[in-house]
Image (cartoon, rainbow, N blue to C red):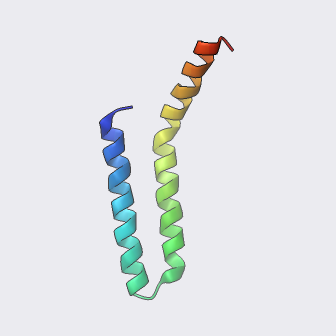
Amino acid sequence: MDVDVIFKIAAIGIIVAVINQILTRSGREEYTMITTIAGLIIVLMMLLPHISELFRYIRSIFDL
């Protein structure tokens, strides 16, 4: 896994945290959960190719 992916995940986490703070202070607590879930989905979509590669590597190790 490249370091670039880790920086992208960290950037998304910081952006989501800032948006959640802004929404909480403006009295829109119901939207904070939506932004958190959206950030989680974005990160999972970024990691899907890497997870697939991991499973392929594990299969090749154990000859499954």
Residue 54 in the image: above or below residue 47: above
Q: How many marks?
A: 0
Residue 28 pos. (x, y %): 47, 84
Name, please, the residue furthest toward the right: 64
Identify the residue at horizontal 55%, vertical 30% (top origin). Answer: 52
Residue 55 in the image: above or below residue 35: above
Residue 13 pos. (x, y %): 38, 58
Q: In screen coordinates, is 2 left or right of 62?
A: left
Q: Which quadrant would the N terminus be assigned to in this image?
A: top left
Residue 33 in the image: above or below residue 63: below
Name, please, the residue furthest toward the top: 63
- Where residue 2 sits, quadrant-wise, is top left
Residue 7 in the image: above or below residue 15: above
Residue 23 pos. (x, y %): 41, 80
Residue 16 pos. (x, y %): 40, 64
Q: In screen coordinates, is 62 left or right of 9?
A: right
Identify the residue at horizontal 31%, vertical 37% (top origin). Answer: 3
Identify the residue at horizontal 36%, vertical 79% (top origin). Answer: 22
Name, please, the residue furthest toward the bottom: 27
Identify the residue at horizontal 52%, vertical 26% (top origin). Answer: 53
Q: Which quadrant would the C terminus be assigned to in this image?
A: top right
Name the foreground residue: 57 vs 31.
57
